[in-house]
Image (cartoon, rainbow, N blue to C red):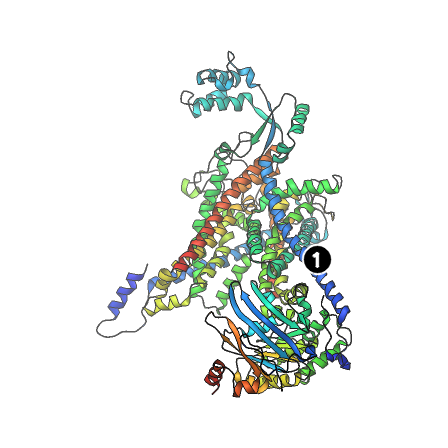
Amino acid sequence: MTIAIERPTQAQIGSSGASANGNGRYAIEADAMSVFYGDFCAVREVRMKVPTNKITAIIGPSGCGKSTVLRCFNRMNDLIAGARIEGEVLFQGHNIYDAEVDPVEVRRRIGMVFQKANPFPKSIYENVAWGTRINGFRGDMDEMVERALRSAALWEEVKDKLQQSALGLSGGQQQRLCIARAIAVEPEIILMDEPASALDPIATLRIEDLMKELSEKYTIIVVTHNMQQAARISDFTAFFSVDDNRSGHLIEFDDTEKVFTNPGQKSTEDYITGRFG
Amino acid sequence: MSGGDSQAHSMVGGGPELDLRRKPRFTETIIRVFLFLCGAISILTTVGIVFVLGRESLLFFANEEVNLLKFFGETEWQPAIGWFGIWPLITATFMVSVIAMLVALPLGLFIAIYLSEYAGQRARSIVKPILEVLAGIPTVVYGYFALTLMTPLLRTMLGRDLVEIYNTASAGIVVGILVIPLVSSMSEDALSAVPGSLRQASYGLGATRLETALRIVLPAALSGVAAAFIVAISRAIGETMIVAIAAGAGPNFTFSPFQAAETMTGHIVRISGGDLSYDSIDYNSIFAIGLMLFLMTLGLNFLSQWIVRRFREEYE
Amino acid sequence: MMALQSSQRASDPAAGFMPSGETYHGQVRTRRRRGRVWALIFQAAMLSGVIALCALLLSIVNRSFGYVAIVNEIDPAELAVDGVPLNELPKEKLVPILEANISSGLMRRYEHDMPFAERSRENVHGLILERVVEPQVEASWGLFDSVFARGSIMAEAEERFPGSEVYFRSWLTASFISKSQSSEPLRTGVRTAIFGSLWVVFITIVFSFPVGVGAAIYLEEYAHKERFLNRLIQTNINNLAGVPSIIYGMLGLAIFVRIMEFVTSGAFLSGGDTTANGRTIISAGLTLGLLILPLIIINGQEAIRAVPSSLRQAGFGLGATHWQVIWHHVLPSAMPGVLTGTILAVSRAIGETAPLVVVGASTFIAMDPNGPFSKFTVLPIQIYQWTSRPQDEFRNLAAAAILVLLVILLALNASAVLLRNRFNRNRANA
C-alpha cells in the first residue's frame, strides 16, 4: 500500500509520487490550508491528501481543530462570521475556495453528517427526498428514497412509517436517516463529524458497519474522539495536535495500522499510549 | 422588614431544650396573603370585564326593540332610531384588519426572515431599535399620520373622486404599519429558536440560503409564525385610535376600502366621547359591541396559544 | 465555473437521475438568481419599515413649523400712539388702549384676576394682542413647502388673503408648553394636558407598581405551579395582556365612573359637592393601572426568574424565612429589571388614548387639575381633539403636541435603557 503523507515540515514519505490519475487516487487534497477566526489562527498549514474510497479518520486532543478541518472540506466554515481560510483545498483538481466556485455546488458533492443527529422536522420520506428535490432530481422519488434508506441500513425499520415525523425515531435511527439523506444527493465524499458520539454502543456499532459498507462507494472522512473507533474502522489516520498558540496542526498522516502501532512522531505515540494503553 | 422579628422568635424558641417545631409566623402569613391578593386582582379584572360587558349587553338585548335576529340580520346600525344591525361595524372592522394584514404579514415576516437568516450584527443593531421605536409610538400619533399623510397620499395617487377624506384603506395601511414590529419580533423569535443544526444540515445537502430559510427554517418555525399572525389580527381588530381618526365617523355598510366606514372600536369611542346618558340604548349598545370585540380578540388569543402548544416541535 | 466531474458511480444504473455537468450548473445559477431576488425583497421590506418611521416623524415635524398667514382684526399699526409702534409703548400707554377696545365687563374681570397695577408691561401687551389685535390664522403651510417653495407661498397668500401678514411660525414654543388650553389656536397651550398626564400616570404607578410586583412575587416565589388556581391566574394574566385597551376603558367607565362614583368623584370627602361625576383623574389612573398591570406582572416575573437560585439557597441556608430571602436578596437583584419593565409599561400608559376617551376625559378644560378628584385632560386626548378638527391650524397644534409627547416618551425610554446598561455594568463588575 502506498500512501501520501504530507506534513508541514516534512517531505513526502513513502509516496509513489503524484499518480497519473490524481483525480481518481485522491478525493481531496489540502495544501497549506490555514483557518483563522478573526486574528486567531485555529488551524495552521495543513497539507494532506485524502485517498479515494477509503475511510480516513481524524483524531487528536480536543481543541485541535479536527472539526474545523473537516468543515473546510465542504466550505461549511463559510457560515461562521469572521472565519477565513488560506491555502488551497483541491477537489478533483479544482480549488474549492476559488472565487468563482459556488459553495452550494461543493456541498452537494461533498456531503456532511453531524455530531448530533439533526433530521428536519418533516416526515422520514421528506427528509431523504428534500435534498434531491432542491438539487433537481428527476426520476422515481419513491425508488430513490428506498435506495438511500437501504444504503443507510434503515429501510427495514422505517418502511412502514415513511410518512411519520423523523423526530419520532431513536437517536441511532435518526443518525442513519441523516446518512441516508446525505447519500441521497449522490455526493462523492461524505464528511462525518463524530457521527456516533451521542449514541449508545449498539447504535454506534451499526453506524460503524454502515461506514464500512459505504466506503466501497464513497470517500469517508470521519472526525472521532474515540481512538478505538478510529483504529477499528479507518484505513488512514490523521493525527492533529495543538501548539503553544492554541493553533491546531497536522502531526502525522499515515496508514492507520502504522499510526497506531508504529507512529512516526513522538507526540502521536504519547497521545495514543496515554489514552489508548 | 420582618428580619429582627423572626430572629428574636428563634432565639426564644431555641432555649436550653431544642425545639424544632413549626411556629406560626404571622408576618410571613400576612405577606403571603397580601401577595396572593395582588395576583387575584387580575382574576377580578377579568371577572369585572365579563360582568360589565355581559350585564350591559343583557340590558341591551332586553330592550324590546332589539333581538339577536336583528342584531345579526340587519345591515343598518343607528340605535338611536331603532336600527340594530351590527354588520356595518363588523365589515368595517373586517376591512381594516384585512388591509392591515396585507401590509403587516408579508412585511413583518420578511423583516423577521431577514433579521434571523440574513442580517449581520450591524444591520440588526440598526433595524431592531427602529422597530422598537415604531412599536413604542402611541396609536394616536399613528392616527395623525394616517389622516395627514397616508390619506392625502392615497388621494393623490388614486384620485380624489375615488378616495374619500375618511376611508378604511388609509386606516388599514397604518394599522398594518403599527403591527409590523409585533409580527416581526414574534416571528423572529420563532425563527431564531430553530436549531442551527437544521440550517447546517440543509447547507450540507447543497441548499442555498433562500432554500434553507424558506423550506427548512420557516416550516420548522411555522407554529410560532402562525401564532404571531393571529396575535397581529387580534391587535388590528382591537386597534382604536387610528380608525377613530382616519376611517370615518358613521356606520356604513360598504365593501369599498375607499369609503368612510366606522369600525366597532371607532364606534365605541365616538359614542362614549359624546354626551352619553347612562342606561340609554346608546350606552348599552356600546357594551354589546364591546362584548363582541372582547370575545373575538379573546378567541384569537386562545387560538394562538393553542397553536403554539399543539404544534411546537420539540428539539431535545 | 469549474466543471466538476460526475463520479464513477454515474455508471450505476440506479443512480443516474441527479443532474450533472452543464445541466446542474445552469440549475444552480437559476437557484442563485432566485436567492438574490428574494434577498432584495427581504431588504426592501426592512427598508419599508425604516421609511415608515421616517415618514411618520417627518410628517409631524413638517406640520410643527412653517409659514402662516395671519389676518388681524385691527392692524397693530393703527394702535400706534404718536408714531410710537405698539410694541415699544410703555405700560401706562397700553392700558388705555386696552380699555378703549374691549368691553368694560371684560376689563373688570381682568382687574379682578389681577389688578392692572400689578401686571407687567408684557402681560398687558399680550392682552392687547389677544383681545384687540385678535390675529386669526387664515392658512398655514408645512416646513418643507416653507423652505423650498417660499415664493409660491407668498404669492398664494397675497392673492387669497390680501392684507394678511405672512411669517414663519414655530407651533412648538415655550408659551405653547406653558399656556393652558384655549379655543384660539394662536394662544392655546398644553400645560393643562401635561399636568393631567402627570397626575393620571402618578395614580397609575401608585396603583399598578406595588400590585404588579406583588403579583409577580407571588407567582414566581410562592405559587405552586400545578395548583389550578395559580395556573388560572397565570393564564388569565397572559390573556389580559391581549385584551384591547378600549375594553379596559369600558370597564373603567362602568366600575370606576359609575358604580364607584361616590368615591372617585371625591364626593365622600366634600359631602357630595363636586361637578366631576366620577370622570376624574383617579378613575383614569386606575383604569390605566389595570391596563398595564399584566405588562408589569409579566415583566416582573421574568426579572425575578432571572435571579439565580443559588442566591436564594444561600439565604435559606443561613436560616432566613422565605420573605426575608425575597426582600433582602431576590428583590434587590431583580429590581433593575422590574423597573425597566415598569418604565416601558408606564410609557405605554402615557400614550394611551382610547380608554381615557371612554372613561370620559374632558374635551375642553382650561383649569389645571389640582388633585386625584379633578376633571382632567391628557396629552393624547388633546392630540386627538386637535387632529379631529378640520382646520389646518389645529393639525399644526396636534403636531406640536405630538412632539411634546414623543419627547416625554423618548426621555422615559432613554432612562429605561440607561437603567438597563447600568445594571449590566454592575453585574459585570460584581
Counting from the top left corner in percent of width and height, residue C305 is at 45, 63
Please say whether residue B316 is visible from this viewpoint. Answer: no
Identified at 55% across, 29% down, the residue is C186
Residue C375's place in the image compared with A271, above or below, is above
Counting from the top left corner in percent of width and height, residue A226 is at 53, 82
With A228 as the anchor, is C306 left or right in this view? left
With B34 as the anchor, is B296 left or right in this view? right
Classify residue A120 by image quadrant: bottom right
Quarter the C terminus of chain B occupies:
bottom right
Q: Nearer the viewer, residue B175 or A85?
A: A85
With A161 as the anchor, is C304 left or right in this view? left
Neighbor class of circle 1 (other Cα within 10 Å; few <14, some 14-19, many 20+) is few
Q: Nearer the viewer, residue C333 or A273?
A: A273
Residue B242's place in the image compared with A144, above or below, is above
Please say whether residue A19 is visible from this viewpoint. Answer: yes
With C288 as the anchor, is B117 left or right in this view? right
Name the residue furthest left: B16
Amino acid marked by disc 1: Val
Chain assignment, label 1 = C
Q: Which residue is mark 1?
A: C37
Residue A45's place in the image compared with B164, above or below, is below
Counting from the top left corner in percent of width and height, residue C335 is at 41, 56
Helix, strand or loop for disc 1:
helix
Q: Nearer the viewer, residue A100 or C202?
A: A100
Classify residue C55 by image quadrant: top right
Counting from the top left corner in percent of width and height, residue C375 is at 49, 39
Quarter the N terminus of chain B occupies:
bottom left
